[in-house]
Amino acid sequence: MPSRPLRKLGFLTIGMFDEADPRPGHDATLALIELGEDLGFDSAWVRDRHLQFGVSSPIAVLAAATQRTDRIELGTAVIPLGWENPLRLAEDLATVDILSGGRLNPGVSVGQPTHFAHISSALYPDTAALEQFGFERLTRLLHCLRGGRVSDFSGTEGIESYSERVQPHSPGLIRRMWYGGGSLRSARWAGRNQMNFLTSSVVKLEAETEASARNEPDFASVQLAHIQEFRAHHPDGERARVSQGLVVIPTDSATAEQRAKYESYARVRLERTCVPQGPQRLLFAPDIVGPSAYVAERLSAHPAFREADEVAFALPFSFAYRDYVQILTDMATRLGPALGWRPGGVVAP
């Protein structure tokens, strides 16, 4: 059993679709979120994918999900702020949070957009060289969500009334803001700025981490260092919220064909987990595939998992809808209980 009993069980989907017929893919994403609620999951998350065949507008998709669900929390993991105007995004986030009844959990990240040299003239035709993609962009978003002043004009003009802050204002939303980080620097920033921390199946191996490690750093030890760094700088300390997002595939009710597909998927991806990848020296977590008892044993031995009491397990990108139904069903009925979780967030004694 992990040192922190699993309190919240969530899942994440990329929401893939066919370019020639995108509606069925989006409908399937919404159907998975509905299934997640029916199965008792605490949260469902969508991943932002620009200029790809996955969810490019997570807020629009989650707005639709608010009208098809009643209880499940809805998150983004993550919205890259380099694509966004913080004030406009704040309006969208607050609106969807109001529609959801306070269930939105926006996850965001900073940094220059991927392939920026190829898209800068379309995204920022007049200001590309001036745009700032660091934490100051996130600071602006948080200011808007807190109800900070964004206009020096308010009052009535003719028959129209104007506010000096973003409308609608959703007071509780600021406490449900998450930062998706994979480095010590991002962990520190999220903690100091009182955000929640999303850590996924990818982390950055930094010189600072290597210098403090007694042995060769592996994914789990690096991720654990990030969680500890986050909590060390957060006012809530050990109570600060952390959610882990590994790729986990329980196979209890899978067919033989499905098990073979899942094992092949993990096997092909295993090589990249052996050594740091690319100039950023990224470490990838191995996928965990097998019966729930085996998966629970692996997770309970994972140092970083033992420090988190919330998860958003990532669904593989390229599987069929029926595969996702089987995986989510086994997560909720087999894996979650094996980790001490119960629907509705009630932890087993």
Image: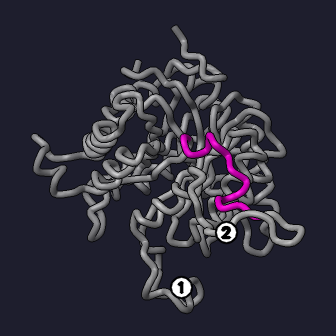
Q: Is residue 328 above or below residue 153?
A: above
Tell me the SS state at disc 2.
loop
Q: Which residue is mark 1?
A: 119
Q: Say what amino acid the circle numbered 1 marks.
A: Ile
User: Is residue 217 covered in magenta?
Assistant: no
Q: Is residue 318 above or below residue 280?
A: above
Q: Which residue is mark 2?
A: 153
Figure quadrant of the N terminus: top left
Q: Which residue occupies the foreground of this view, 179 or 86? A: 86
Position of 129 with respect to 93 (left or right) is left
Please tell me which residue is depicted at 78% across the width and 67% down the height of the picture: 22
Residue that extends furthest to the right in the rendered view of this protein: 159
Magenta part of the chain: 162-175
Position of 149 with respect to 195 (left or right) is right
Q: Which residue occupies the foreground of this view, 232 or 320? A: 232
Position of 86 with respect to 303 (left or right) is right
Give how far across and how far down residue 299 sits, in percent.
Answer: 40, 31
